[in-house]
């Protein structure tokens, strides 16, 4: 029987700067889905690639004194080596400079023109050069700048071809609101209200002001402008209007396009319109995820806050990075990146959770039975509950993956990991091991654990493909034991399974040392970005240095007045800069009462990571206020000094919530 096809794509990335963790998210997410589908027996096509044309690339190449193609070649290689490093197993890599794509885009453009969907006109509007985007007035940010990069825009006018959007408005609205195309579907409202209801604007699809693009065959001087060139990659890479491949029938329509929210509109509205105009079927799902943010800002090269995935991979291994980013990001929501969360995740889930489960189980099988389990077994009632939880994790994972909900899939699998560790605590194998009459029971417990690890590790293998083969070696699982059809049942490992002690899968990380090392790296990145800012932007305005001034006290109060102020100790769990503010940090505190958020004007004096883990004094009964639109529930105490503001740190032995008087 021939396998069912499954086609998944990442966006094609701009090779204008080095890839970062944000790019890694989408690619690793698609890779995990592709691997999961392969494991389920699908014939998978996983496509990724690079979007190489446009003014930005042309300008960068000029700066470097190379041709645009020479410029992108270097960065495309970096993308490819990152994917190799992250163990990303794509089936096809498209470059928009590939001959077959160029030829097909020219044909697509001509076809749309011949059908009357593309016409010639004049474009005038607000244009952001770095983002290569025209914006309408209502889309500009509150300073009248580009809503993407917040840089100034300029009026621009040029002869251009346009793609008619209005004929497709009704069908697109139905696609978004009445089908399960968009994931999460909750995003449909903003698309309909912001773009469809006000009337779809025709799309500018050619440019004359730069050369680095695919030439329009019937009008010299025009090059195809970004979206027809870029979006078409999903079909040209399957052979649409070219002879390089012949996979349209097999793989189109795509099962999943995955993108971040910045390009949702192009994929949810413009791409369906182009496909409708070409009379092609529409992709089945568009999965939209949020941004990986760093200190509250979208992680991107231009913000200078990029954490280098090569550096992180080097320190913790690519599987730990893959796991971390996949586990943190829920479909549709942003996920904030911090060293603290990364390392704690690795320690709690991978070192203490899964890694410890494997090493304890294998070590006990080795210690009590010389590595080979005996056939005599004695099962108990508790085994059934344990097995049920593991099998339920399988079912939940399968369902979540069907819905491209990777975070939920990992959560389901880790429920089984936690249950397995609890099973060890409940059955106390170390006690059974001391009593010869309980050897049958011990063998049963260890077999159940090994078989659970077989299921769990196979389920984890699409997400952490480098580590799981090491687990299979340790628990004595053959390739045949981990096929998908065998993950929904227990009793698959051979009765006399033989374990083999191996290396520690995820070594525990010393949090303090590691945070320090990573902070150094990030600070260096920040410094490079900061060196381009003015002294005022850097917050370097000198404080008033009149230290010899007389101190004037506020009017006297009595003890009852003071008693009205509730001061409590609190621990800083995380901190990030408040968007568009130089002064404010938003802190998440453990206040011993369930946690709260406080905004504090100390951003010029403290980097967020300087505060995380520290114990501070909190004015806990202050009326909540909104600062720059962010709610603050209280205030943290700090001293004004000649060197600026200094937060009052307390001894860390003081517990969160302790009353200060
Ligand atoms: O937009 N968090 O390319 P691009 C999460 N060439 N994902 C992120 C991210 C972040 N901080 N930063 C980038 C383009 N991404 C076009 C696409 S497709 C036909 C053309 C990921 O290099 C995310 O998938 O700017 C986002 O959609 C994509 O990179 C944008 O990549």
Image (tube, helix red, strand yellow):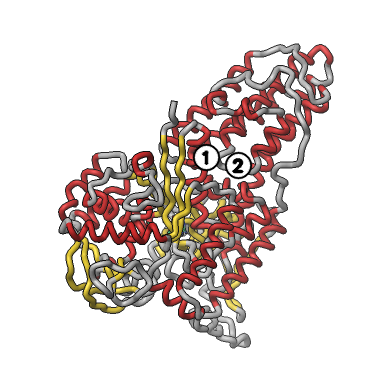
Q: Secondary structure at mark 2?
A: loop
Circle 2 sits on which residue?
A: 465
Q: Is residue 621 visible?
A: no
Query: Dot 1, how many residues are within 10 Å of its Cα: few (below 14), some (14-19), or many (20+)?
Result: many
Q: Quadrant of residue 233?
A: bottom left
- x and y percentages locating residue 338 in the rendered image: 57, 57
- x and y percentages locating residue 56 in the rendered image: 41, 72
Circle 1 sits on which residue?
A: 35
Relative to 480, is 218 on the left or the right?
left
Residue at image coords 51%, 48%: 90
- Identify which residue, 633 or 302, lies in the foreground: 302
Q: Secondary structure at mark 1?
A: helix
Q: Is residue 44 above or below residue 156?
A: above
Are dots 2 and 1 in contact, CB under 8 Å? yes
The span from disc 2 to disc 1 (Cα, nearest Å) is 9 Å
Q: Is residue 379 visible?
A: yes
- x and y percentages locating residue 413 in the rendered image: 55, 34
Q: Is residue 405 above or below residue 423?
A: below
Query: Dot 2, how many residues are within 10 Å of its Cα: few (below 14), some (14-19), or many (20+)?
Result: many
Q: How many numbered badges does the structure rendering display?
A: 2
Q: Quadrant of the N terminus?
A: top left
Q: Is residue 150 above or below residue 587?
A: below
- x and y percentages locating residue 273 in the rendered image: 24, 52
Residue at image coords 44%, 70%: 581
């Amino acid at each position: 029987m021939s396998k069912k096809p499954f086609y998944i794509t990442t966006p094609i990335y701009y090779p204008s700067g080095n890839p970062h963790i944000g790019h890694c998210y989408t690619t690793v997410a698609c890779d995990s889905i592709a691997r999961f589908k392969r494991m389920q027996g699908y014939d998978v096509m996983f496509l990724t690639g690079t979007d190489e044309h446009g003014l930005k690339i042309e300008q960068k190449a000029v700066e470097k004194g190379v041709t645009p193609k020479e410029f992108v070649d270097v960065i495309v290689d970096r993308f490819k080596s990152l994917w190799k490093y992250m163990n990303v197993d794509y089936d096809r890599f498209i470059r928009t400079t590939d001959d077959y794509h160029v030829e097909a885009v020219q044909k697509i453009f001509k076809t749309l023109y011949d059908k009357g969907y593309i016409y010639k006109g004049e474009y005038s509007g607000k244009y952001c050069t770095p983002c290569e985007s025209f914006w309408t007035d209502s889309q500009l940010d509150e300073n009248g700048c580009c809503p993407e990069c917040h840089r100034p825009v300029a009026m621009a006018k040029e002869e251009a071809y346009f793609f008619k959007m209005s004929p497709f408005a009704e069908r697109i609205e139905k696609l978004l609101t009445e089908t399960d195309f968009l994931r999460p579907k909750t995003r449909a409202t903003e698309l309909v209200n912001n773009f469809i209801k006000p009337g779809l604007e025709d799309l500018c699809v050619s440019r004359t002001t730069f050369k680095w693009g695919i030439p329009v065959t019937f009008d010299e001087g025009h090059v195809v402008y970004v979206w027809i060139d870029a979006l078409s990659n999903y079909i040209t890479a399957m052979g649409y209007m070219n002879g390089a491949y012949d996979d349209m029938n097999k793989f189109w329509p795509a099962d999943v396009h995955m993108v971040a929210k910045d390009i949702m509109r192009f994929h949810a509205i413009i791409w369906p319109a182009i496909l409708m105009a070409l009379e092609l079927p529409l992709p089945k799902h568009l999965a939209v995820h949020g941004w990986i943010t760093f200190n509250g800002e979208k992680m991107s090269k231009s913000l200078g806050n990029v954490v280098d995935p090569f550096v992180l991979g080097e320190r913790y291994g690519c599987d730990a990075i893959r796991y971390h980013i996949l586990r943190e990001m829920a479909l549709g929501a942003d996920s904030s990146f911090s060293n603290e969360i990364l390392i704690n995740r690795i320690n709690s889930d991978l070192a203490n959770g899964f890694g410890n489960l494997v090493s304890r189980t294998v070590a006990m099988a080795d210690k009590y039975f010389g590595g080979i389990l005996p056939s005599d077994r004695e099962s108990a009632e508790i085994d059934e509950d344990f097995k049920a939880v593991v099998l339920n994790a399988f079912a939940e994972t399968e369902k979540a993956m069907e819905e491209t909900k990777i975070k939920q899939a990992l959560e389901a699998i880790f429920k089984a990991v936690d249950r397995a560790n609890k099973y060890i605590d409940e059955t106390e194998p170390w006690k059974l091991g001391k009593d010869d009459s309980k050897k049958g029971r011990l063998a049963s417990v260890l077999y159940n654990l090994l078989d659970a690890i077989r299921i769990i590790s196979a389920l984890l293998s699409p997400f952490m493909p480098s580590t799981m083969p090491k687990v299979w070696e340790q628990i004595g699982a053959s390739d045949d034991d981990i096929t998908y059809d065998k993950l929904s049942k227990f009793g698959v490992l051979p009765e006399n399974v033989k374990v083999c002690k191996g290396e520690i899968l995820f070594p525990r990380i010393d949090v303090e040392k590691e945070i320090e090392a990573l902070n150094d790296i990030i600070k260096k990145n920040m410094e490079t970005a900061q060196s381009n800012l003015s002294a005022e932007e850097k917050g370097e305005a000198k404080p008033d240095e009149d230290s010899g001034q007389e101190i004037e006290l506020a009017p006297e109060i009595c003890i009852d007045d003071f008693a009205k102020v509730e001061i409590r100790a609190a621990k800083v769990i995380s901190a990030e800069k408040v968007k568009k503010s130089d002064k404010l940090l938003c802190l998440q505190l453990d206040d011993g009462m369930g946690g709260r958020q406080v905004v504090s004007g100390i951003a010029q004096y403290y980097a967020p990571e300087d505060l995380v883990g520290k114990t501070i004094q909190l004015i806990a009964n202050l009326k909540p206020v909104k600062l720059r639109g962010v709610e603050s529930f209280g205030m943290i105490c700090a001293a004004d000094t000649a060197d600026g503001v200094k937060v009052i740190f307390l001894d860390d032995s003081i517990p969160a919530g302790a009353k200060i008087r």
